[in-house]
Amino acid sequence: MTSKQKDHTTSSDAKGRLRISLRENREILKFCFLFALILGVFTILLQINAAQTNFVEPHLHQIASACGKVLSALGTQCDVAGSSITSSRFSVNIVRGCDSLYPTAMLWAALLAYPATWKSKTIGVIGGAIVLFLMNIVRVVTMFYIGVYFPSLFDMFHIYAWQALFILLTLAVWLFWAAKFAGAKASIRR
């Protein structure tokens, strides 16, 4: 066999293995494609000015209000104005990206792309959004207290620790949903 024939045979074998691999992993590839497509649509929708004005900004105010109530219940006197929380010792302004909207969009994209019933997807969409919203309240409140008591650590926790934790939490919510509501246990055990 000549080296040209060997190259052709090796190339044909590689193409055959690739086709087989693509066939075997079709569901995974479909999930990845749908996930990227849905996440892209959510991301674009969240960037539209009308969404910013009518949804994102009021949502930021809602987060500040909820955090203000939690802080007050914990004995911290603070004032809430729009998306700002102010006390005599520390102030924080909740801006885009300091909400749970993008993690929720990522979760929803994964939920909607996953092959499951619409009933289980609905449970995941609603339940996941609630969990991530509540976790964001915890995040903002803890960041407020870090700003009060450990201001030198604020940026590190804000930029690194909570960002990573929120991504992991989003993944954990999706995995919990997949195991409990989407029937993933059976496919994982196979």
Image (spheres, rainbow, N blue to C red):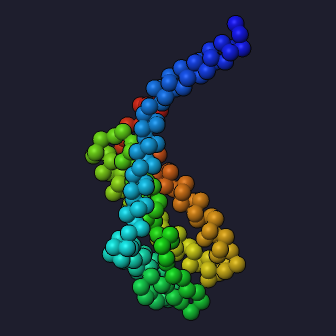
Q: Along the horizontal axis of the image, is 115 left or right of 163? A: left
Q: Along the horizontal axis of the image, is 4 left or right of 92? A: right
Q: Is residue 183 visible?
A: yes
Q: In this view, does 84 lie above or below 168?
A: below
Q: In this view, does 7 lie above or below 175?
A: above
Q: Is residue 176 visible?
A: no
Say which of 36 and 11 sits in front.
11
Question: How many numbered marks does the figure carry?
Answer: 0
Q: Which residue is drawn at 51% across and 82% down?
A: 93
Q: Along the horizontal axis of the image, is 80 left or right of 8? A: left
The quarter holding residue 43 reads bottom left
The image quadrant where one finds the N terminus is: top right
Instruction: From the top left corner, tell me how far across and down residue 99 is, in percent.
Output: 47, 69
Q: In this view, does 123 lie above or below 186?
A: below
Instruction: From the top left corner, tell me how far across and down residue 87 is, in percent.
Output: 53, 89
Q: Which residue is drawn at 56% across and 92% down?
A: 88
The quarter holding residue 51 reads bottom left
The quarter holding residue 17 reads top right
Residue at the extreme bottom = 88
Say which of 68 and 112 sits in front.
112
Q: Along the horizontal axis of the image, is 145 left or right of 24? A: right
Q: Residue at x 62, y 68 (%)?
A: 159
Q: Is residue 80 above or below residue 21?
A: below
